[in-house]
Image (cartoon, grey):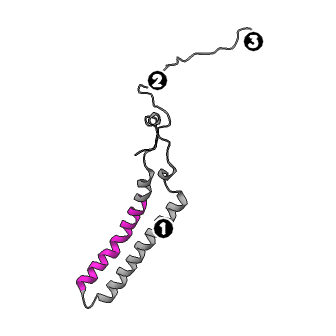
Amino acid sequence: MSRTPWRHRDEPRAESITGARAGLTQDLRGRQRRYLAAMLVRTGCVVLMALTWSRWPALAVCALVGAVLIPYVAVVVAQAGWRQQRGVRHALANAPEEPAARVVLEPTLILPPEGNTTG
């Protein structure tokens, strides 16, 4: 059963701090760890390729393909993580639906006063 009084249920809830995204420092640290883990797996693929090249060429080729594709996948995954954490942005101001009327200014010629003639 909810402990919220019935008169407060219709009001909008305040935003929770737990819904806030992680700070930039924490996010950067997490992306660096994921990228480092992917590069360690890539290093393992290169070592596996070198060790199995003469005995099991099919396994060595699979390891080579993994070593080539892992950097691309690691960068895409690291960059996608930040976008997923952004969440919904609240509108700061309502944009006008119709553009404002344009004012056309006509050029005017400004002449010096006639009384000030130096000559």
Observer-side mark, 3 or 2, equals 2
For the point 49% across and 19% down, the residue is 104
Q: Amino acid at mark 2?
A: Ala
User: Picture quarter containing residue 83?
Assistant: bottom left
Say which label, 3 or 1, has the lower sequence index: 1
- Disc with the residue nearer the chain's start (1 vs 2): 1
- Span colored in magenta: 57-79
The disc placed on residue 116 is 3
Q: Is residue 117 above or below residue 83?
A: above
* Residue type marked 3: Asn
Residue furthest to the top in view is 115
- Number of residues whose C-alpha sits closer than 10 Å to that of mark 3, classed few (under 14), some (14–19) or many (20 or more): few
Q: Residues within 10 Å of mark 2 (few under 14, many from 20)?
A: few
Residue at the bottom extreme, as displayed: 55
Residue beneath disc 1: 32
- In three-dimensional space, the C-alpha distance between marks 1 and 2, rounded to whole angstroms, equals 47 Å
The quadrant in which residue 64 appears is: bottom left
Q: Is residue 20 magenta?
A: no
